[in-house]
Image (tube, coloured by chain):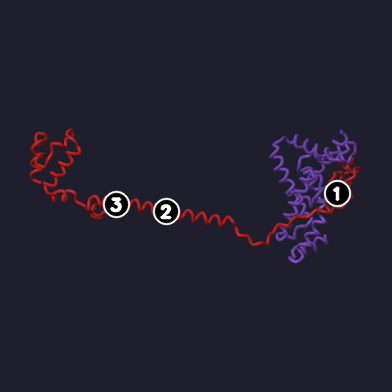
Chain colours: A purple, B red
Amino acid sequence: MNQDTALVKRLKTPSEKDSAFTDLVKKYQEKLYWHVRRMVVNHDDVNDVLQNSFIKVWNALDNFREDSQLYTWLYRIATNESLSFLAQKNRKQADSFDDISESYANQVKADANFDANQLEWKLQLAIQQLPEKQKLVFGLRYFDEMSYEQMSKILDTSEGALKASYHHAAKKIEEFIKSN
Amino acid sequence: MENKQTIEQELEQIAPLLNRISKKPVQTLPADYFEKLTIPKPIASASVVSMNSARKWYGWAAAAVVTGILVLGGLQLMNSSKNTLEKQVGMDYAELTSLNVNEWVQKIPNESIDEYLQSANALAGSDNSLHHYTVDGVTGTTVTGISDEELQLYLND
């Protein structure tokens, strides 16, 4: 995290803000992209959410309190943008949870590379069966290998609750893969 | 970041199958997406004149003009009514409002009242009850309908 401390210092320096922001985007764009994509699924939607997230980061840089880590702050912004996007989309569709899950699963299947026999694709389908919060928890722990402490700062949830949620999600996913 | 081994050990306890699956992303995305990704930075430094405040100013000015027109029009209307009345009676408004009607009528000569009654009769026509009245005619024509007390009051005034 020493690199992030230096990056934050540059971001707070007016003459270096632009170049520091470019470096920040390069460093975190992939991680944040896949984090958003696990929630939002469709690439074009992910692109919009990701861009909006980075714009929010740019606008909020002057208010960034260095007592929180840059990493968790970025994830928090991207998570909130994803959830807002999904809330808006689900409001328009006004479908039941099962219908929404099916809709996301169908979007996964619509991918040009989709292969129903591959474990990796079954994993992606299984993730789309989970409620939004559980999807988030599972993704942050399983793919981003975050600690419960970091996840707690991003999601404003206790570590105990996160641990229970992750365990529950992992078991459900394993069951889905075994039965499909 | 938490030890990767710790996370794998945890998963081995709860869902070991997931430890066998590659975490490499499988979904497609456009070629060179990350190389080409640019974030449009909002323009923050330009001095912006708020159209909202300009619109408010115009609104207030327009409202003031309309109010002024209405007030002036109303005043003009009141003045013209007053003027018309003043012209008709040959007195200004202040004199009219302070007038004691009884005193004023007492000062009018009987000939003037007769003249008025005759012109009013002509306008009213023969069916109108005014037709029979003059100043002296009042006492002649209608005396049977008036009580002695009323007559006495009239003569004493």
Q: Position of residue B88 (x, y in %)?
A: 24, 50
Q: Quadrant of the N terminus of chain B?
A: bottom right
Q: Earlier in the sequence, mark 3 or mark 1?
A: 1
Q: Please say if the residues under marks 3 and 1 sit with CB atoms less than 8 Å apart.
A: no
Which chain does tag 1 point to? B
Say which mark, if any, is on residue B69: 2
Say which mark, if any, is on residue B31: 1
Q: Note whether A10 is above or below B64 in the view shown.
A: below
- Which amino acid is tagged 2? Ile
Residue at image coords 37%, 51%:
B74
Residue at image coords 75%, 48%:
A48
* CA neighbours of label 2 inside 10 A, class few (<14), some (14 to 19), many (20+): few
Say which mark, if any, is on residue B82: 3
Q: Spatial distance from mark 1 to mark 2, Cα to Cα?
A: 68 Å
Q: Check disc 1 and report its element: helix, strand or loop.
A: loop
Q: Position of residue B143 (x, y in %)?
A: 9, 36
Q: Nearer the viewer, residue A100 or B103?
A: B103
Q: Nearer the viewer, residue B5 or A29?
A: A29
* CA neighbours of label 3 inside 10 A, class few (<14), some (14 to 19), many (20+): some
